[in-house]
Structures are given as structure tokens and as C-alpha cells.
Image (cartoon, grey):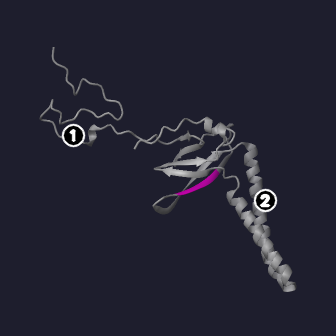
Amino acid sequence: MTAPNPFADEPLPTSGVRMHSAADALNPYAAPSGAAEYQLPTDPGVGVWRDGKAIVVHVDAKFPPRCLKTNDPSELEHTQKITWSYMFDWWQRRNYFSYALASYLWKRNRLIRQIGIILMVLGLLLFIGSFLLARVDADYGTVAFFISLVSFVIGWNTVTRWGNYLKFVKANKSYLWLKGAGRPFIESLPQWPGLNR
């Protein structure tokens, strides 16, 4: 019976364990060791996880078809833009995420955004009217001008910010930490396994 071959007869090592060196004393004619002899760990991949009260999302991930707040099944989607930048890189990055909302949340968001659009239109009309009113009475024109600005700003804020539940916390590689999801949704996600560096 022949002696076992340590290079062929041993099973593959588990992750992070170095394989036998090609420059091992058992084989003096082997090539020097290289990077290919290490089994490199990989990142968790594309998905959505929980990390405490935050969710961790890969930039290419798709959210599950469940309400972000209540975790109820839903087909009604809301799209939100998330922007971020890194500490020493001033270029702002952005990504659009579509997540499901329960029907009452989706309808409420739509109604409030429609009210915001109406406020913006009224603000623009009052802005134009303030110049016409200023010809008749300067004081009324000034008051109408400021009311138009307030109406437009409130409408703009309502349209652009209302219903965007997710808030950016931090970024690492292609993973974003976001807050704003409901507790039932967060608890349904798998635990974040962490990044392998």
C-alpha cells in the first residue's frame, strides 16, 4: 500500500484557511506560493438584510413585495431616490429603490402629493397675481407675493419629500444602510452577515 498524497487526498479547506503551499517542503520542485492558494471570502451578494433598526440594501437589490411599514403583501410600489457620497469623494451618488406600500399608505401618499401640486400651482398663480395687485395697491401686492412664495415652498416640499420613508444612514462598498422601515418588515429580513474585508 502506498503512502497518502497530502496534495490530492486531503479535502478542500474551509473558507479563510490557507491551502498547502506549493513551496512546501514535501515538494521541493514546486513553484513558489501565490495568491491563488488562498480561498478568498466573498461579500454577501445582492439582497436586503436587517442590521439593528436599519436595513442593509445592495444598490442592485429589489425589495420584497411586502409593505415597507406593515410587512403585509402588496403590489403597490413607491419609488424613492436615495443620494449619498463618501467622505473624501464629493461626487454625489444616487440610486432609485422601489418598495411596496400597503394600499392605505399608497393612497395617502398620492393624495398628499396631489395637494402639494395644487399648492404649487396656486403659489404660481398668486405670484403672477401679486404683480397685477401691486399696480392697484402696493401693500396688497407685497402680501400676495409672500403668500405665493410660502404656498409654493410648502407645495414643493410636500411633493418632493412626503412619503419617502427611507433615510440614508451610511454606505460601505455597494451596500447602503437605511432607516425608516417598519419593525414588522425589519424583523422579517435575515440578519446582516457582515462584509468580508
Which residue corresponds to mark 2?
115
**Residue 29 in magenta stretch:** no
Query: Which of the pair 42/194 is nearer the observer?
Result: 194
Q: Is residue 62 visible?
A: no
Q: Under tag 1, what secondary structure? A: loop
Residue 3: image quadrant is top left
State the image quarter where residue 120 is shown: bottom right
Query: Dot 2: within a 10 Å radius of its alpha carbon, few (fewer than 14), some, or many (20 or more) residues?
Result: some
From the top left corner, tell me how far across and down residue 160 is, in percent.
Answer: 68, 60
Sequence-wise, which precedes: disc 2 or disc 1? 1
Residue sitting at x 66%, y 52%:
164
Q: Which numbered disc, 2 or 1, marks the residue closer to the eye?
A: 1
Quarter of the image where the C terminus is located: top left
Query: What residue lies at 87% left-to-right and 84% top-to-bottom?
Result: 137
The secondary structure that dominates the magenta segment is strand
The amino acid sitting under disc 2 is Ile
Where is 154 relative to 134, above or below? above
Numbered-mark total: 2
Disc 2 to disc 1: CB gap under 8 Å:
no
Is 15 on the left or on the right of 100, as rendered? Answer: left
Between 183 and 76, the one lying in front of the other is: 183
Q: Which disc number belongs to residue 41?
A: none
Residue position for label 1: 33
Please indicate whether residue 14 sits to the left or right of residue 10 in the image: right
Chain part drawn in magenta? 79-84
Q: Give the position of the N terminus as an image quadrant.
A: top left
Say few, some or many: other residues with alpha carbon within 10 Å of mark 1 (under 14 / 14 to 19 / 20 or more): some
The amino acid type found where label 1 is placed reads Ser
Rounded to the nearest angstrom, the CA distance separating label 2 from label 1 is 68 Å
- Looking at the image, which residue sits at the far top? 1
Kind of element beneath mark 2? helix
Q: Position of residue 9 (x, y in %)?
A: 24, 23
